[in-house]
């Protein structure tokens, strides 16, 4: 391999390393924004669920927010476990 091709290979590798850092930072910032938006939504949903039902049913309807979050966590964990088992080398 001559020097010109080797220099191009080093430059390409450095460019990919810089792109990987930029992609990692952008994914991290996106997940951070997603977390803030999900957290901001919880208060409004709790108030709505507490005010919506007929008298005597407020606890039942409000509890569904927590139940649905727990079901989502279990499903996400099951999907992650399944993908981990399926995609192992």
Image (tube, helix red, strand yellow):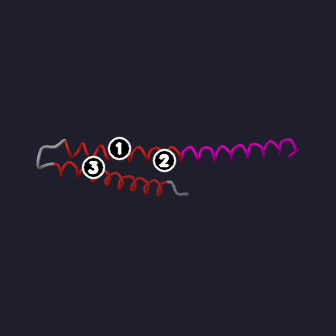
Which residues are the magenta region?
1-27
Q: Which mark is residue 65?
A: 3
Side of 81 relative to 56 (left or right): right
The spot of residue 63 in percent (x, y) is 23, 52
Which residue is located at x 41 percent, y 43 percent? 37
Q: Position of residue 43 (x, y in %)?
A: 31, 47
Instruction: Check the image and name the residue furthest to the right.
Output: 2
Query: Would you say the magenta stretch is mainly helix, strand or loop?
Result: helix
Q: Which mark is residue 59?
A: none
Q: Residue at x 32, y 51 (%)?
A: 69
| In this rendering, the label closer to the viewer, 1 or 3 | 1
How would you rate the neighbour count of disc 3 (Cα within 10 Å): few for under 14, some for 14-19, many for 20 or more?
Answer: some
**Location of mark 2 (residue):** 32
Q: CA distance from mark 1 to mark 3?
A: 11 Å
Q: Are marks 2 and 3 in contact (CB under 8 Å)?
A: no
Is 2 above or below relative to 81? Answer: above
Which structural element holds mark 3? Answer: helix
| In-front residue for pair 78/17 | 17
Q: Earlier in the sequence, mark 1 or mark 2?
A: 2
Task: First in sequence, mark 1 or 3: give its number.
Answer: 1
In this view, the residue in front, 12 or 24, is 24
The disc at residue 41 is: 1
């Amino acid at each position: 391999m001559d020097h010109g091709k080797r220099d191009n290979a080093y430059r390409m590798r450095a460019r990919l390393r810089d792109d990987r850092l930029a992609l990692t930072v952008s994914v991290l910032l996106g997940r951070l924004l997603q977390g803030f938006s999900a957290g901001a939504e919880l208060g409004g949903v709790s108030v709505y669920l507490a005010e919506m039902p007929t008298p005597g049913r407020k606890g039942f309807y409000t509890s569904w927010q927590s139940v649905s979050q727990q079901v989502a966590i279990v499903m996400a964990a099951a999907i992650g476990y399944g993908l981990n088992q399926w995609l192992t080398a």
